[in-house]
């Protein structure tokens, strides 16, 4: 989910934080790529069995052709505080599966009703994309054979991307997840792969919001994040105004007559601000295992001309 309402508030109060830049300006950079969102994008764009491999390959080609070294970061074990959110998401998916079955069994009375049913089926189906463990393992094997650096985060991928960026292992983080800003990613690149790429500057957001990082984290938690239930009837705009005025959640709670036993801002704040991770080794491009890579791609039914073009780039 990321941070509820954050994108709209950035566009309203800190539009200067968002800029479009030519990809060639990032030549020589090292970037952490949050794979958690990308894999869903690949599956959504193409329902073929090898869409995740083709998607990763296209990203590698795009970055290499522009002189950028990607470091692909996969999700690890989510923190316990995220369990409620994950349970709710699973329950919502199960409801969608039931609805999908109902629609498929329904016999339409006319062509117009049939069109409406098919439209709803297509909409629900697009929301039921599943990334299997096998898909993730195949992506890692593909990267290993290609010599492309990757790692599995101890927890959420976007948090580890922030850790890598804070400690100088990468220069930018590529993600569409808005809580990357809350974790402290200073420069964030959107996941597009065109000539121009969208960059978000967290320091400008803080300046325009007139918040320091502590207040910003509290605003994000109060607005709505993945690690705690929100306070009823307190949305993003209200949260923004309350934190602007009172600076922190403790002071906000003194002023509002609303309570929620499920609003655990303490643990959320800890998740966003504490990074108890060991430093990794430097990420570098390794030798490509050409023969094994070709065999792997052939098994995934990748076309020969696609394989040859990819091999030329990664060798």
Image: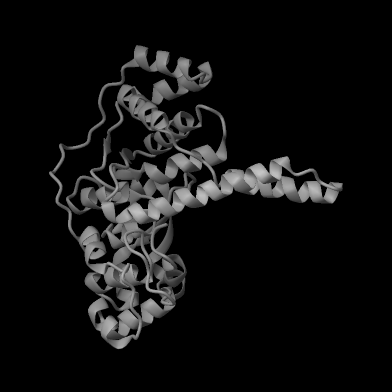
Reply above or below: 11 against 120.
below
Q: Residue 186 at x, y = what percent? A: 28, 59
Tell me if 108 is positioned left or right of 102 in this view: right
Q: Residue 185 at x, y = what percent? A: 28, 57
Q: Nearer the viewer, residue 4 or 9?
A: 4
Q: Residue 307 at x, y = what percent? A: 47, 20
Task: Locate the N terminus and report the quarter of the image it occupies.
Answer: bottom left
Tell me if 30 is positioned left or right of 240 in this view: left
Task: Locate the C terminus and report the quarter of the image it occupies.
Answer: top left
Reply above or below: 76 against 250.
above
| Residue at x-position 45% and y-position 48% | 90
Reply above or below: 303 against 245.
above
Reply above or below: 261 against 251.
above
Q: Quadrant of residue 252?
A: bottom left
| Residue at x-position 26% and y-position 42% | 153
Tell me if 307 is positioned left or right of 75 in this view: right
Q: Residue furthest right?
A: 110
| Residue at x-position 49% and y-position 45% | 194
Q: Quadrant of residue 17?
A: bottom left
Residue 196 shows in this picture: no
Q: Nearer the viewer, residue 92 or 132?
A: 92
Q: Nearer the viewer, residue 147 or 144?
A: 144
| Residue at x-position 30% and y-position 87% | 255
Q: Residue 282 at x, y = what percent? A: 17, 37
Residue 4 shows in this picture: yes
């Amino acid at each position: 989910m990321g941070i509820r309402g954050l994108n709209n508030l950035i566009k309203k109060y800190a539009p200067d934080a968002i800029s479009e830049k030519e990809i060639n300006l990032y030549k020589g950079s090292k970037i952490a790529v949050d794979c958690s969102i990308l894999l869903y994008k690949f599956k959504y764009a193409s329902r073929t069995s090898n869409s995740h491999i083709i998607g990763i390959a296209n990203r590698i080609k795009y970055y290499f052709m522009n002189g950028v070294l990607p470091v692909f970061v996969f999700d690890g074990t989510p923190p316990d505080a995220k369990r409620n959110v994950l349970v709710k998401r699973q329950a919502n998916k199960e409801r969608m599966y039931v609805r999908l079955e109902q629609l498929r069994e329904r016999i339409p009375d006319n062509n117009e009703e049939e069109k409406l049913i098919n439209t709803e089926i297509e909409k629900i189906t697009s929301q039921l994309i599943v990334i299997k463990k096998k898909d993730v393992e195949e992506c890692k094997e593909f990267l290993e054979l290609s010599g492309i650096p990757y790692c599995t985060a101890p927890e959420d991928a976007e948090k580890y991307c922030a850790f890598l960026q804070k400690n100088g292992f990468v220069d930018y983080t590529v993600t569409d997840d808005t809580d990357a800003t809350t974790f402290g990613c200073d420069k964030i690149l959107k996941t597009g792969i065109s000539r121009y790429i969208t960059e978000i500057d967290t320091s400008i957001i803080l300046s325009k919001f007139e918040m320091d990082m502590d207040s910003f984290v509290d605003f994000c938690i109060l607005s709505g994040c993945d690690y705690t239930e929100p306070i009823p009837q307190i949305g993003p705009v209200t949260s923004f105004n309350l934190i602007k005025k009172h600076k922190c959640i403790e002071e906000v709670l003194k002023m509002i007559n609303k309570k929620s036993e499920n609003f655990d801002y303490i643990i959320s704040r800890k998740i966003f601000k504490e990074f108890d991770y060991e430093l990794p080794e430097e990420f570098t491009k390794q030798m490509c295992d050409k023969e094994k890579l070709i065999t792997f791609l052939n098994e995934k039914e990748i076309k020969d001309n696609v394989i040859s073009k990819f091999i030329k780039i990664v060798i």
